[in-house]
Image: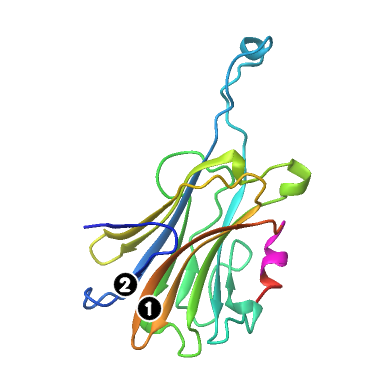
């Protein structure tokens, strides 16, 4: 049974899920369809959603919340961590279609001991030039699936209005003793690139 979370909630991931090892973190979003109407609505065909290239990334952080190496940044330009425990399945350029737009796989038991947190972020590629922000995105979510049986364990739907925000700190998986937990963050920022985001870490 899926656990649905609200912003700020935290929940056990491995505790109570004996043997949980390989998980898929799915992130999804949809462009907001433009409203039809107005003098040119019919002529211009209104209703077509703009193409917005959102990119999902994961920062593998140490116990001090630091990104100690760019090799610990997993995104469309570096699809696999150097340790091989976390990998990105590839870039989706438009956000069209149902289900996950981008997916990240993590093998919890293989994550190095010095990594204490996986932070999942989504930013809009080339947002300044394209004049795009997360007010143009709806139905954003993060979910965690047990890869061994394809069961969805956790889902967090981001329901706030993120107008004016160009990056989202979506959620995090972090160590709690010998277990792993998930936290629903849902914070929007005005970072205009992944490079700006990682400067904070």
Q: Where residue 45 sits in the image (x, y, percent)? A: 61, 16
- Residue closer to the observer: 4 or 111: 4
**Left or right, residue 145 beside residue 8:** left
Q: Where residue 56 sits in the image (x, y, percent)? A: 55, 58
Q: Which span of residues is magenta-colored? A: 192-197
Residue at 38% in and 63% down? 24
- Prevailing secondary structure of the magenta residues: helix
Give the residue at mark 1.
108
Q: Where residue 46 sits in the image (x, y, percent)? A: 60, 19
Residue at 46% in and 49% down? 28
Q: Is residue 179 above or below residue 34?
A: below
The answer to which quarter of the image holds residue 47 is top right
> What label does residue 13 carry, if any?
2
Residue at 49% in and 69% down? 87
Q: Secondary structure at mark 2?
A: loop
Q: Is residue 33 above or below residue 190?
A: above
**Left or right, residue 197 beside residue 106:** right
């Amino acid at each position: 049974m899926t656990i649905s979370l609200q912003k700020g909630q935290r929940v056990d991931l491995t505790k109570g899920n004996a043997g949980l090892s390989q998980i898929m973190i799915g992130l999804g979003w949809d462009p907001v369809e433009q409203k039809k109407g107005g003098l040119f609505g019919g002529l211009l065909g209104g209703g077509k959603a703009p193409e917005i290239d959102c990119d999902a990334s994961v920062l593998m952080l140490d116990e001090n919340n630091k990104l100690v190496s760019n090799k610990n940044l997993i995104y469309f330009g570096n699809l696999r961590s150097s340790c091989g425990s976390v990998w990105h399945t590839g870039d989706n350029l438009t956000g069209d279609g149902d289900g996950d737009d981008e997916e990240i796989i993590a093998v919890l038991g293989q994550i190095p001991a010095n990594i204490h947190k996986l932070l999942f972020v989504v930013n809009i590629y080339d947002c300044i030039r394209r004049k795009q922000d997360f007010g143009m995105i709806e139905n954003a979510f993060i979910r965690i699936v047990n890869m061994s049986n394809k069961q969805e364990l956790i889902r967090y739907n981001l329901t706030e209005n993120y107008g004016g925000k160009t990056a989202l700190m979506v959620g995090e998986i972090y160590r709690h003793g010998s277990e792993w937990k998930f936290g629903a963050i849902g914070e929007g920022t005005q970072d205009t690139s992944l490079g700006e985001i990682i400067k904070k870490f």
